[in-house]
Image (spheres, rainbow, N blue to C red):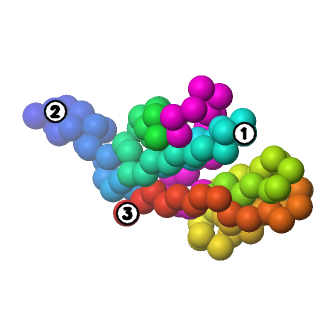
Amino acid sequence: MIRKTLAALVVVLPLLAAPAFAEYGAIAYSPQTGRYGYSYNYWYLGDAESDALANCDAPDGEIVAWCRNEYCALAVADDGSYGYSSGPTQASAEAAALSYCTGPNAHILCWDYSGD
Protein backbone atom coordinates (compact mmCIF):
# COMPACT_ATOMS: atom_id res chain seq x y z
CA MET A 1 0.00 0.00 0.00
CA ILE A 2 2.78 2.41 0.88
CA ARG A 3 4.58 1.69 -2.39
CA LYS A 4 1.44 2.43 -4.41
CA THR A 5 0.94 5.71 -2.54
CA LEU A 6 4.55 6.73 -3.11
CA ALA A 7 4.32 5.79 -6.78
CA ALA A 8 1.19 7.92 -7.16
CA LEU A 9 2.92 10.87 -5.49
CA VAL A 10 5.89 10.58 -7.85
CA VAL A 11 3.48 10.93 -10.77
CA VAL A 12 1.15 13.60 -9.33
CA LEU A 13 3.51 16.00 -7.53
CA PRO A 14 5.35 17.23 -10.65
CA LEU A 15 1.99 17.95 -12.27
CA LEU A 16 0.96 20.11 -9.31
CA ALA A 17 4.17 22.14 -9.51
CA ALA A 18 3.79 22.82 -13.26
CA PRO A 19 1.91 25.90 -14.46
CA ALA A 20 -1.75 25.32 -15.17
CA PHE A 21 -1.36 26.26 -18.83
CA ALA A 22 1.62 26.29 -21.13
CA GLU A 23 0.09 28.21 -23.98
CA TYR A 24 2.10 28.88 -27.12
CA GLY A 25 1.69 31.41 -29.87
CA ALA A 26 3.71 32.16 -32.98
CA ILE A 27 4.15 34.74 -35.73
CA ALA A 28 5.00 33.75 -39.31
CA TYR A 29 6.24 36.27 -41.87
CA SER A 30 6.92 36.30 -45.61
CA PRO A 31 9.64 38.85 -46.46
CA GLN A 32 8.81 38.49 -50.16
CA THR A 33 5.08 39.22 -49.95
CA GLY A 34 4.82 41.05 -46.62
CA ARG A 35 2.12 38.65 -45.49
CA TYR A 36 2.03 37.49 -41.91
CA GLY A 37 0.05 35.09 -39.79
CA TYR A 38 -0.21 34.43 -36.11
CA SER A 39 -1.63 31.92 -33.67
CA TYR A 40 -2.24 31.83 -29.94
CA ASN A 41 -3.29 29.60 -27.06
CA TYR A 42 -1.97 26.28 -28.33
CA TRP A 43 -0.83 23.54 -25.98
CA TYR A 44 2.06 22.60 -28.28
CA LEU A 45 4.58 24.85 -29.99
CA GLY A 46 4.47 22.81 -33.19
CA ASP A 47 0.72 23.34 -33.47
CA ALA A 48 1.10 27.08 -32.90
CA GLU A 49 3.79 27.28 -35.59
CA SER A 50 1.74 25.26 -38.08
CA ASP A 51 -1.30 27.48 -37.61
CA ALA A 52 0.73 30.68 -37.92
CA LEU A 53 2.25 29.43 -41.18
CA ALA A 54 -1.19 28.46 -42.50
CA ASN A 55 -2.53 31.92 -41.63
CA CYS A 56 0.45 33.55 -43.36
CA ASP A 57 -0.42 31.68 -46.57
CA ALA A 58 2.84 32.44 -48.40
CA PRO A 59 5.30 29.95 -49.91
CA ASP A 60 8.29 31.63 -48.27
CA GLY A 61 6.56 32.17 -44.91
CA GLU A 62 8.71 31.37 -41.91
CA ILE A 63 8.28 31.42 -38.17
CA VAL A 64 10.00 34.54 -36.88
CA ALA A 65 8.78 34.64 -33.29
CA TRP A 66 7.03 32.48 -30.76
CA CYS A 67 5.85 33.00 -27.24
CA ARG A 68 4.83 30.91 -24.27
CA ASN A 69 2.63 32.68 -21.73
CA GLU A 70 3.98 36.04 -22.93
CA TYR A 71 3.97 38.48 -25.85
CA CYS A 72 5.83 38.47 -29.15
CA ALA A 73 6.03 41.15 -31.83
CA LEU A 74 7.18 41.67 -35.43
CA ALA A 75 8.49 45.01 -36.71
CA VAL A 76 9.09 45.84 -40.39
CA ALA A 77 10.74 48.76 -42.19
CA ASP A 78 10.40 50.38 -45.61
CA ASP A 79 13.56 48.71 -46.93
CA GLY A 80 12.26 45.21 -46.18
CA SER A 81 14.26 44.66 -43.02
CA TYR A 82 12.46 43.25 -40.02
CA GLY A 83 12.98 42.46 -36.37
CA TYR A 84 11.14 40.36 -33.86
CA SER A 85 11.20 39.55 -30.18
CA SER A 86 9.22 38.28 -27.24
CA GLY A 87 8.79 39.59 -23.73
CA PRO A 88 6.67 39.71 -20.59
CA THR A 89 4.70 42.77 -21.74
CA GLN A 90 3.45 44.02 -25.08
CA ALA A 91 5.55 47.15 -24.72
CA SER A 92 8.78 45.23 -24.05
CA ALA A 93 8.21 42.82 -26.96
CA GLU A 94 7.45 45.70 -29.33
CA ALA A 95 10.41 47.80 -28.15
CA ALA A 96 12.82 44.92 -28.65
CA ALA A 97 11.39 44.07 -32.09
CA LEU A 98 11.76 47.72 -33.15
CA SER A 99 15.35 47.81 -31.87
CA TYR A 100 16.23 44.79 -34.05
CA CYS A 101 14.62 46.33 -37.14
CA THR A 102 17.31 48.64 -38.50
CA GLY A 103 15.60 50.03 -41.61
CA PRO A 104 13.83 53.36 -42.11
CA ASN A 105 10.33 53.96 -40.76
CA ALA A 106 10.27 50.79 -38.68
CA HIS A 107 6.86 50.01 -37.25
CA ILE A 108 5.06 47.14 -35.55
CA LEU A 109 3.31 44.94 -38.12
CA CYS A 110 1.94 42.36 -35.69
CA TRP A 111 1.98 41.41 -32.02
CA ASP A 112 0.68 38.34 -30.33
CA TYR A 113 -0.13 37.20 -26.80
CA SER A 114 -0.51 33.67 -25.64
CA GLY A 115 -1.32 32.77 -22.08
CA ASP A 116 -3.97 32.62 -19.45
Q: Is residue 79 magenta?
A: no
Identify the residue shown where x is 67% and y is 45%.
Answer: 34
Q: Nearer the viewer, residue 32 or 86?
A: 32
- Label number found at residue 4: 2
Do the CB atoms of the residues marked 2 and 3 lie less than 8 Å apart? no
10 Å crowding of disc 2: few (<14), some (14-19), many (20+): few
Which percent across, then down, holds residue 33?
Answer: 67, 39
Q: Residue furthest left?
A: 1
Q: Residue at x 81, y 47 (%)?
A: 80
Q: Residue at x 82, y 55 (%)?
A: 78
Give percent across and percent down for residue 79: 86, 50
Q: CA distance from mark 1 to mark 3?
A: 31 Å
Magenta-highlighted residues: 56-72
For badge 2, the amino acid type reads Lys
Q: Which residue position is annotated with label 1?
A: 31
Mark 2 falls on what kind of element? helix
Q: CA distance from mark 1 to mark 2?
A: 56 Å
Three-letter residue code for mark 1: Pro
Figure quadrant of residue 2: top left
Mark 1 Cα within 10 Å, few/some/many (few <14, many 20+)? some
